[in-house]
Image (cartoon, grey):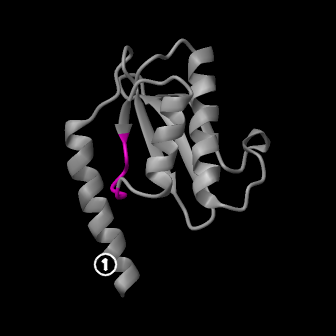
Amino acid sequence: MATAKKLRSRNKIKKRIRKKISGTTSIPRLSVFRSNKQIYAQIINDLNGETLCAASSRDAACGSSNNKVEQAKEVGKLLASRAKDNNIESVVFDRSGYLYHGRVKALADGAREGGLDL
């Protein structure tokens, strides 16, 4: 029951965030999904409803670090390099209801190090 309550609470926060944040053609949205083992990120244009680029810790280019925070940082750097290939300079960060701490913060920091403007 505690897991269901936690999920309901996160979805409530996620909806509150999504009311204020929207990805456009000039400034798309960087959305994060965090599971227990992996972390996924994608850059989305909400006006057209399309994913412009994506990266995850399951990609071979992220390396095989056992530390999940380091994996998240690598995912951020990989996503930033893929965004640069698609001529994306700045994005708006959507933490999807997760606290800006740990792996989510590491992903954002990695994206900044890769050259994205958050």
The residue lying at 46 percent from left, 51 percent from top is: 104
The image shows residue 102 at horizontal and vertical percentages of 46, 58
Amino acid at the residue labelled 1: Lys
102 sits to left or right of 76: left
Q: How crowded is mark 1: few (under 14 residues within 10 Å), some or many (20 or more)?
A: few
The image shows residue 7 at horizontal and vertical percentages of 36, 70
Instruction: Depth check: give the residue in front, 75 or 33.
Output: 75
Residue 1 occupies which quadrant of the picture?
Answer: bottom left
19 sits to left or right of 86: left
Answer above or below: position of 10 versus 56. Answer: below
The residue lying at 44 percent from left, 41 percent from top is: 31
> How many marks overall?
1
- What's the magenta region? 94-99
Answer above or below: position of 94 versus 47. Answer: below
Instruction: Depth check: give the residue in front, 112 or 83.
Output: 112
Residue 30 occupies which quadrant of the picture?
Answer: top left
Q: Label 1: which residue?
A: 5
The image shows residue 3 at horizontal and vertical percentages of 40, 80
Is residue 37 part of the magenta span, yes or no?
no
Q: Which residue lies furthest to the bottom in this view?
A: 1
Instruction: Depth check: give the residue in front, 100 or 52.
Output: 100
